[in-house]
Image (tube, grey):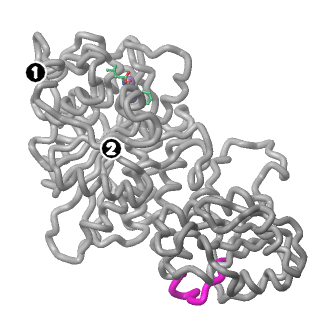
Amino acid sequence: MLDISFAKPALPNAGALVLLIHEGDKPSGLWQQADEATGGAIARAFEVAEFNGGKGKTCSILAPGAGLTRVLAIGLGKEDNVKQTVLEDAGGSIASSLARESTVSVAADGLKPGQAAEVALGAVLRGYRFDRYRTKEKAEDKPKLAALTLLTDHPNRAKSAFEPLKGVANGVFVTRDLVSEPPNILNPVEMAARCEKLSELGLQVEVLGPTEMHALGFGALMGVAQGSVNEPRMVVMHWNGAKKAGEKPVCFVGKGVTFDTGGISIKPAGGMEDMKWDMAGAGAVIGLMAALAGRAAKVNAIGLVGLVENMPSGSAQRPGDVVTSYSGQTIEVINTDAEGRLVLADVLWYAQEKYDPKFMVDLATLTGAMIIGLGHEYAGVFSNNDQLAERLVKAGEISGEKLWRMPLHENYDKQIKSDIADMKNIGGRPGGSITAAQFIQRFVNKKPWAHLDIAGMAWSGKDAPTIPKGATAYGVRLLDRLVADHYED
Ligand code: BES
Ligand code: MN
Ligand code: ZN
């Protein structure tokens, strides 16, 4: 993780200097000092580039004098309306555009201490790399930037504001590491082992194997797992941070299909490698639990993940099989590629029955149809509870992990009616994400619940300001915000 420090404002005489500028501001503080030390080079560059601090605008000046390698100015827009995402994005653009610099100072003397911390968070998030499997990378292809100093009038306050954000960034990295791992390494057993390691953070971690899950009657989850030589696992992670005794927990459930071939209803070859990230819902739940522990959130939270590999083989389940879920409801498996809902069915029923939570939120890369519907900008949220849905949508706006509410309605139920069982596991093409959510709703037993279909959000094909291309960890920041704003005592 990029090393962050905070110090009192003093003009550096080496390395790169970043200026964070509000639209329409006049030079003052470090900005003014740097301009004077460079003989007006900054003012001249701004003039030529027509840079005035507009949101997202930047101006880069190479070798301006005064010992500096460069000055990078980033516009924040009007001072009275700087959103958290703008500050984080500024931090992200520092980490990406100055990756080849070794010493970087950020003039944050025009910002509040909490805002300086948010810039730092953005830089840390963008600085993430998954390079575990590179053995031949040349030094010149690696980023040099390892440390960032933010210059602020209140370094101690900025540092305390950054402390919890560091815990959240660590959670995001936990998720990104899991989602990036190749599927031969990260099978359900390995993923459960990685969860167990998180007990270092103060989480209590329980792992259930096939014997326990079979004995409990997890017929839906076990049916998906039966074609793979890699055994399934269910992991339950507890964070007990509430100050009040006996507070009911909040509960998060993740789909963890470590590889989804489709099973006997096998997927086409093109792009199938993407299905290594079919465990991103579980990955987000695990990273969220790490984040809550890392910032010592005052909440009781439980994270449950159902971990399976969906493979075709002589022992795999067949289209037409009928399985009995943990809830007792029977399911006709028409398509073995609609496996995520089968996994969630058993884990959700277990969660509500065993822990009687305040609410359950599940996350799943559940349907390709969700990508058709919302693309790669919003995840879909389906909920039986307006308050929970509204809080989630709001947390999405603040965190930048956006959610769009989708409908649930009993009229969709006819699409998942089976001729021989209580339901079938697919509802045809029309409203494919909705019939999947209708299916899952049958396993929440009327508890306040929201289902997040993150199929379009878990992986990114291109760099974004605070997210390098690859695993996004969508959901961690969103749900951390939900908890922080509504469920801590
Ligand atoms: N994991 C997939 C959904 C998915 C597809 C996520 C592409 C991300 C990118 C899920 O298990 C699946 O295969 N869903 C099927 C459901 C269908 C068989 C009803 C789908 O969306 O095609
Ligand atoms: Mn599938
Ligand atoms: Zn899947």
Which quadrant of the figure contains the C terminus?
bottom left
Q: Is residue 477 left or right of residue 300?
A: right
Q: Which residues are magenta?
A: 149-158
Amino acid type of the residue tagged 1 in the rendering:
Asp
In the image, is residue 192 above or below residue 302?
above
Q: Quadrant of residue 332?
A: top left
- At label 1, counting other C-alpha atoms closer than 10 Å, the crowd grade (few under 14, some 14-19, many 20 or more) is some
Q: Is residue 204 rendered to the left or right of residue 192? A: left
> Separation of disc 1 and disc 2 at Cα?
30 Å
* The disc label shown at residue 258, or none: none
Q: Position of residue 451 (x, y in %)?
A: 26, 42
Pair 1/2: label in front: 2
Locate residue 325, reporting x and y percent. Answer: 17, 29
How far across and how far down the image is residue 343, in percent?
A: 28, 33
Mark 1 falls on what kind of element?
A: loop
Where is mark 1, residue-wise?
422
